[in-house]
Image (cartoon, rainbow, N blue to C red):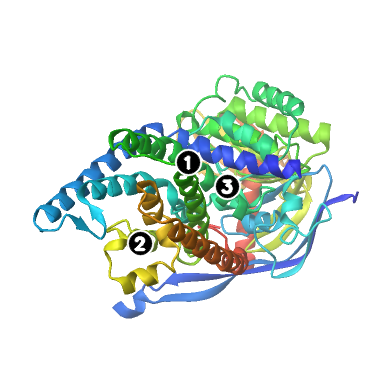
Amino acid sequence: MEDYAVRVENVSKWFKAHEVRRSGSFVTKLLRKTYFKHALRDVSFDIKQGEIVALLGRNGSGKSTLIKILSGILHADSGKVSVLGLEPWTERIELAQQLGVVLGAHGQLFWNLPAVDAFEYMRGVYNIGQEEYRRRLRYFLKTLDLEHVYSRQVRTMSLGEQMKCNFVASVLHNPKIVFLDEPTIGVDLPSKIALRKTVAELQAKYKTTFILTTHIVEDIGIAQRVILLSRGKMVFDDTRLKLEAMFGDKRHVELHMAEPNHINFGRYGKVLKRGETTVVMEVSKNVLKTKNFLALLNRKEILDYRVAEPGLNFILNKFYAKLDREKR
Amino acid sequence: MFKTIDRYLAVLVIGFKQQLAYKKDYFLTLGFRIFASFIMVAVWTAVYLNSDVTSIGGFTLPQMYLYFFLINAIAISSFNEPISENIQDDIQSGTVTTALVKPVAYTAQIFLNSLGNNIFAGLAVTLPFLALIVLIGHLALSIQAIAFFLIEMALSFTVSTFIFFMIGTLAVYLTNIWGIIAVTESLYMLLGGGVVPLSLLPSWANNILALLPMQLSLYLPAATLLGMASTGEILQSILVGLVWAVPLFALSVLVWNRVRGKITSVGG
């Protein structure tokens, strides 16, 4: 058994895309402009068995294309891909038995049928033994609080319940690799936590590899590693902690004042938000200890203050802004 | 081997269950089909009453009534038009991606799923409707007629599956193929004897239609149950169906091999 779950070497993918012309005569507007879109450019990385990797990037950065290539739905135009030692698009059926794919809210479910019918369907399609099926289903229903939901018609479920059932349907057969595309959209907070916990448990117990695409920052917390795509190119591949440390010299300082005043906060750092009696600033770590800044905190107009490390949200936003600047 | 059968069975069962969710729709369909038959009854009554003949194309008026009742009973389960709609829906809604990550070939999924649908339609509409016709119309059925009827239905389903499968694959290029499906279905009805019994047509047209597989779907099963098709005619049509099945299957495989790489679904 090879140690790597996924190996991607110099993968590129183009798409033929169409665009409607917005200017010109009536006839030219009717004719679409065809162009080639570079969805992935020379992407390379390895993922070891049992890793949880967050695949991040803005809309249209190539995440879904990459997931579709890894699961054998699309083929790469150049480069090599090996998933569990198989080439996904030529050995799709063999690979499918060992893959779990969560796409959208109810992709694995049947709109007019209860979720349990979809689970039964998975049992048949993936040849799960009766005993194992019951044991795993019991476990998922309990941990994800679905015991009172799973025998109801999918269309009567809330979005969050659909997402959870969809997740269960995708992992019932104990896949070696799971692709999760936005797994927690519309899911309430306790369920989000339960989903993340389940992912962590599956990883610890079965060494399941998870590749996760998400725009929800808290989800990224379960990943040890982050791969960032921008316009089809890989721009970051390292641990989550490294990403968090990238802009780590900044702190967010929140000040509360008794009444509106004219203090020039711009002197100390970038003002992110200014209300009548509150200010949020981004301040360099070394400015925090300067006499000037300490004097500011000690001024009688300042009632209270809070210093916090910037969240992943902020860091990603900075990162994207940096990429935009570089592009220009 | 058993594992593969289990997989296929699961797909078949889910196709059946999905239709089970539309139970009420099937009662409506049954009602609508009976109503539609009465429209043809009215039309043909007018035709017979305004002409001097007692038989048109070998059909007396009561036989004509029974013919159209039978056509309406059979049409819902004898040809596999839903398979094209299913492919179109899969591509439009993006569920094709979920289907493509299952350890069962997409072609097998789409075929078995529609087989499940059709078996349900057969049991929910065709069977009760046929029972009504047999009881009310005092239709005397021989074992041989029933056996031929079932063979014709199975063969018709198989051949039409290949045709409508290929129509469905057009969705990969065109996304919305509703119009094409509707036209093909109408052609199927026309060439299969769903609009007028084929025996009414001039002999040259009949000679051409006898070489096409469409009559297996409507005219022939109805004529078989009515006892109006000779054994020779039935066997010849079955042979024609079998001869069509082979190249249509090969063509479907060819078309699918060309198309499969192009499937990406909308939004992906």
Give the CA distance from mark 3 to mark 1. 28 Å
Quarter holding residue A183: top right
Residue type, label 1: Ile
Q: How crowded is mark 1: few (under 14 residues within 10 Å), some or many (20 or more)?
A: few
Q: Residue B112 carries which label?
A: 3
Residue sitting at x 59%, y 52%: B97
User: How many labels, in total?
Assistant: 3
Q: What residue type is labelled 2?
A: Gly
- In the rendering, at what x and y percent does residue B45 appear? 15, 49
Tag 3 and tag 1, C-beta contact below 8 Å: no
Q: In this view, does A210 lie to the left or right of A271?
A: right
Q: Is residue A71 above or below residue A52?
A: below
Q: Position of A266 compared to B198: left or right?
A: right
As displayed, is residue A119 above or below residue A179?
above
Callout 3 secondary element: helix
Q: Are marks 1 and 2 in contact (CB under 8 Å)?
A: no
Residue at image mark 2: B179
Q: Are marks 1 and 2 on the same chain?
A: yes
Indicate the position of residue A188 as horizontal and vertical percent values: 55, 29
Chain to which mark 3 belongs: B
